[in-house]
Image: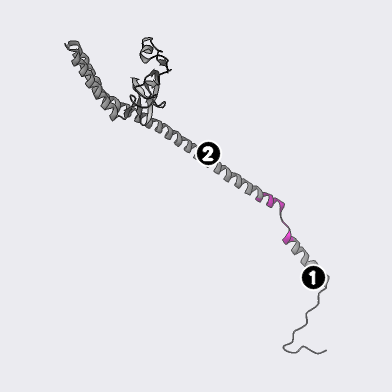
Amino acid sequence: MSEPTEGSVAPQAEQPVGESATSAQPASTSAGASDPNAERDAAHSTASDLVAELTAERDRLRDQLLRTSADFDNFRKRTRRDLEEAERRGSEEVLRQILPVIDNLERAVEAARTAPDARAVAEGVQMVLRMFEETARGLGLVRVRAVGERFDPAMHDALQQVETDEQPPGTVLAEIEAGYQFGGRLLRAARVVVARPRRATDGPRGEDAAAGGDPPTQVN
């Protein structure tokens, strides 16, 4: 039997195949196994964290909703107070401008008690009326045009119709009560008398008038 020379590799002892497979199998089995208790604890911890996050988010949204509701309620109250204050100031301004008219009316009443001439009293009242009309126009009050105008059901309220040939049918002949507009809106319609065509008769106009004719038609 020859001895191994320098540089050659000594042959290793052969091991049985069965022993190698058997010794390696327990290591792989222990590496692939998992602990059921550990997995359950991990899942429970994850669910608890999720519930805690959702609870915190719910509380945050509820607090935000409560604050928003309180802010809106305060805004609504503040808006109502501002509107009431604006309305009060507007009424004060109107009354302030009407006070001189009231003062002049009181002076006219005092003058009427001692005035020897009724004409002077009438002139004084007329002057106060003109002053009131100027004040009303300054506040935006506009009188509805009536006499001589074509009857407009949106602006006029016909209380009476009178037969006449002097004016075209539908013309306003007289104003019983003035109408007014404010800010482009009708406050009160003018109550008027409206012309209508005269009815045809067999006799002369004079005989019809002497007989009394038909009474004016009332329109409600």
User: Which part of the image, by quadrant, shows the N terminus?
Assistant: bottom right
The numbered disc on residue 20 is 1
Report the residue at 82% width, 72% height from top. Answer: 17
Give percent across and percent down for residue 159.
40, 18
Q: Is residue 38 magenta?
A: yes
- Asked whether, in this view, residue 31 is left or right of residue 54, the answer is right
Between the C-alphas of marks 1 and 2, the distance is 67 Å
Which span is picked out in magenta?
30-42
Displayed quadrant of residue 6: bottom right
Q: Amino acid at mark 1?
A: Ser
Q: Amino acid at mark 2?
A: Arg
Q: Nearer the viewer, mark 1 or mark 2?
A: 2
At x 55% / y 41%, what residue is drawn?
A: 58
The answer to whether residue 198 is left or right of residue 26 is left
Badge 2 marks a residue whose secondary structure is helix
Q: Find the residue positioned furthest to the front.
A: 203
Closer to the camera, 185 or 215?
A: 215
Q: How packed is label 1: few (under 14 Cα within 10 Å), some, or many (20 or more)?
A: few
Q: Nearer the viewer, residue 197 or 107?
A: 197
Label 2, residues with CA under 10 Å away: few <14, some 14-19, many ≥20: few
Indicate the position of residue 130 as horizontal and vertical percent values: 24, 24
Residue ID for mark 2: 62
x, y percent for residue 99 = 25, 23
Q: Is residue 95 magenta?
A: no
Residue 64 visible somewhere in the drawing: yes
Q: Which mark is residue 89?
A: none
